[in-house]
Amino acid sequence: MAVANPSYLSSSSLSSHCSSPPLNRTLIPCFHRSSSKYAFSSDPYTPRLVSVRSQASNSEPGHILPVSSGSKTTIPSDDDTATGTSSSVSAIDFLTLCHSLKTTKRKGWINHGIKGPESIADHMYRMSLMALIAGDVPGLNRERCIKIAIVHDIAEAIVGDITPSDGVPKAEKSRREQAALNEMCKVLGGGMRAEEIQELWAEYENNSSIEANLVKDFDKVEMILQALEYEMEHGKVLDEFYLSTAGKFQTEIGKNWAAEIISRRKKWLANTHN
């Protein structure tokens, strides 16, 4: 959940991070389209795209080379791009890049001394479940809510989890995440699926629909529910998370679910101090 260096998208930083890693550092795989071998990033809490495209000495930066498979060379077909279906290579590159969402721990919990905290993917998964089980709301597209929940933090696969404690302005955080998302969609190969991911992310970022309103609430609900679970498990008091979300829920579902969590916390605190 660390903040990535904003230079992570430069061609020089991409190549430099594929050198041999120092000892005692977490190894994050990066991939080369023309090779089945991995290089590694050695930054423990800074998952970022190290290199996903091979580049010949006489090619332009960002030029995607054909994929070599034994004696056969292939490139994604026009039909694949037209239908939004990524080639197998692009799909697996994209999914492997997303692996860091499963392994990167959420920084807010690390800062509060929680051992073995949830990952970014853990957080997004339970938000998706919230969208699945929430009651019907007139005019609300439940499937879209689930999709937004799945992709809303996806750029953190590259930039990491940027929290208020990092002191990064909101506009700068959004810029970094947009740049990372653009790069991830290039890895996916563009097309309709990549465009949909971009659209869903922007909708959430801009809070521009009733679906985005609800998923924004789920983001806060999931956080305070996790805070309560960590309080009960570790015997800590995590007031900060409840205070930072108080009065910020936009939907009735969000307000009601948050109220239920607060009620359970009050009962737990009362029992703990008796």
Image: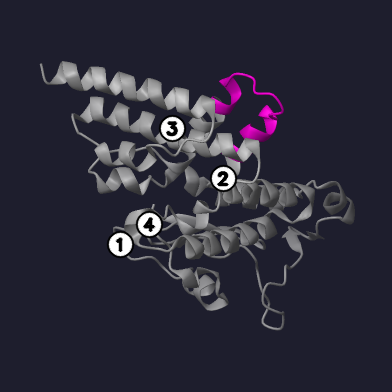
Is residue 54 toward the left or the right of residue 112 in the image?
right
What span is colored magenta in the figure?
130-149
Instruction: Tell whether label 4 touches label 2 (CB within 8 Å).
Output: no
Amino acid type, callout 4: Ala
Amino acid type, callout 2: His
Instruction: Tell whether label 3 touches label 4 (CB within 8 Å).
Output: no
Identify the residue shown where x is 74% and y is 68%: 65
Q: Nearer the viewer, residue 20 or 160?
A: 160
Calculate the distance from the C-alpha at mark 4 to the C-alpha at mark 3: 20 Å
Q: Nearer the viewer, residue 228 or 29?
A: 228
Query: Badge 3: few (under 14), some or many (20 or more) residues near its Cα, within 10 Å?
Result: many
Amino acid type, callout 1: Leu
| Between discs 2 and 4, the one toward the N terminus | 4
Foreground mark, 1 or 2?
Answer: 2
Residue 134 lies in magenta, yes or no? Answer: yes
Query: Relative to 90, is 274 above or below?
Result: above
Q: Nearer the viewer, residue 144 or 46?
A: 144
Q: Which of the 4 image quarters holds residue 229?
A: top left
Residue under label 4, please give it: 2
Q: Position of residue 104 (x, y in %)?
A: 41, 47
Residue under label 3, please give it: 222
| Between discs 3 and 2, the one toward the N terminus | 2
Q: Which of the 4 image quarters holds residue 272?
A: top left
Instruction: Tell whether label 2 touches label 3 (CB within 8 Å).
Output: no
| Between discs 3 and 1, the one toward the N terminus | 1
Identify the residue shown where x is 80% and y is 61%: 73
Instruction: Tell whether label 1 touches label 3 (CB within 8 Å).
Output: no
Instruction: Tell whether label 1 touches label 4 (CB within 8 Å).
Output: no
| Between discs 4 and 1, the one toward the N terminus | 4
Query: Relative to 82, is 138 above or below?
Result: above
Residue under label 2, please give it: 152
